[in-house]
Image (cartoon, helix red, strand yellow):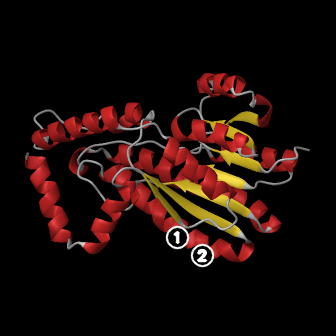
């Protein structure tokens, strides 16, 4: 039996999930790094070998939108390791587009991955954590889970759902010694920029053409200036290793200011600021 706490990380093939898997191993965990497509494991394998921690990382296939995958993976982990001490719900993706122009199937696909998949993986590990009366569940949210931005309604809606789910679950599980945490990053340099945020949904002769052009330019500018995700990984490791983590960990340039502005300023001021920027 592995003499380390057991962590299950979803979406570990890239971005936060990949870097968090390595960092958690270095902080003392044995990590089950799950990903939808095992053909994308090469980068994690290479980094694990380079850092000489490959003996503490186990890569498993799991599509969070497939209930059979979830049941198989979680039952295998529990059968072999007898416990799960940490769940990092990182799997998901971002997509852009104005509400009217985003197809119904695209809304559903996003929610299947970002919301229902996260919920199902969490539900699968809860009996084990409840029985052992300990555990940490880290849900990857976003600044978009605290405030909606034009052209990002699907992503913002999915992250707002994660926020509400996590608040309720935290209150349910605290009596059992299980701590639910929200990690709320701003913009960082990860593969999320390549997986959907630049693929805005747009019809020909779109009435939102001007806004789409503004949003594309804005996203491109953010992508070019976004820092490496070191701060986010530090927040994940801290929340995973501290005995009593906070509910929320907002991380990134301007994130705390944005949240404070939404909480303190009249909403009409925020509307005026955003609409003025979109016209510039």
Q: From what the image shows, is residue 242 above or below residue 16?
A: below
Quadrant in which the N terminus is drawn = top right
Neighbour class for label 2 at 10 Å: few (<14), some, many (≥20)?
A: few
Q: Secondary structure at mark 1?
A: helix
Quarter of the figure with residue 69: top right
* Front-lying residue, 35 or 192: 192
In this view of the protein, can residue 211 be seen by the observer?
yes
Say which mark, if any, is on residue 90.
none
Q: Is residue 67 left or right of residue 101?
A: right
Give how far across and how far down residue 93 sits, in percent. 45, 42
Residues at marks 2 and 1 touching, judged by CB atoms closer than 8 Å: yes
Left or right: residue 61 versus residue 277 is right
Image mark for residue 171: 2
Q: Secondary structure at mark 2?
A: helix
Write down the quadrant of residue 193 in the picture.
top left
Q: Left or right: where does residue 124 sit relative to residue 118?
A: right
Task: Using the image, tell me which numbered label, if any, was put on residue 167.
Answer: 1
Question: Can see residue 90?
Answer: no
Q: Nearer the viewer, residue 217 or 112?
A: 217
Residue at figure coordinates x 82%, y 65% from the top left = 132
Residues packed near mark 1 inside 10 Å, few (<14), some (14 to 19) or many (20 plus): some
Whole-percent x, y for residue 16 in the image: 53, 41
């Amino acid at each position: 039996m592995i003499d380390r706490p057991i962590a299950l990380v979803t979406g570990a093939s890239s971005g936060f999930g990949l870097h968090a898997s390595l960092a958690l191993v270095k902080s003392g965990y044995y990590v089950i790094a799950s990903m939808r497509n095992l053909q994308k494991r090469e980068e994690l394998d290479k980094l694990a070998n380079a850092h000489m921690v490959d003996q503490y990382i186990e890569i498993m296939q799991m599509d969070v939108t497939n209930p059979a995958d979830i049941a198989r993976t979680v039952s295998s982990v529990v059968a072999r390791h007898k416990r799960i001490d940490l769940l990092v719900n990182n799997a998901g993706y971002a997509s852009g587009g104005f509400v009217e122009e985003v197809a119904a199937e695209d809304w559903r696909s996003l929610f299947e991955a970002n919301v229902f998949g996260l919920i199902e993986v969490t539900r699968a590990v809860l009996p084990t954590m409840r029985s052992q009366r300990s555990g940490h569940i880290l849900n990857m949210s976003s600044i978009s889970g605290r405030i909606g931005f034009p052209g990002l309604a699907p992503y913002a809606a999915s992250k707002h759902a994660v926020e509400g789910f996590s608040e309720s679950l935290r209150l349910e599980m605290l009596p059992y010694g299980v701590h639910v945490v929200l990690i709320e990053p701003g913009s960082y340099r990860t593969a999320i920029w390549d997986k959907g945020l630049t693929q805005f949904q747009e019809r020909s002769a779109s009435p939102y053409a001007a806004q789409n052009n503004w949003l594309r330019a804005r996203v491109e500018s953010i992508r070019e200036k976004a820092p490496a995700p070191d701060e986010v990984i530090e927040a994940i490791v801290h929340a995973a290793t501290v005995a009593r983590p906070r509910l929320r960990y907002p991380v990134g340039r301007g994130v705390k200011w944005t949240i404070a502005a939404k909480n303190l300023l009249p909403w009409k001021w925020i509307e005026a600021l955003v609409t003025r920027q979109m016209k510039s």
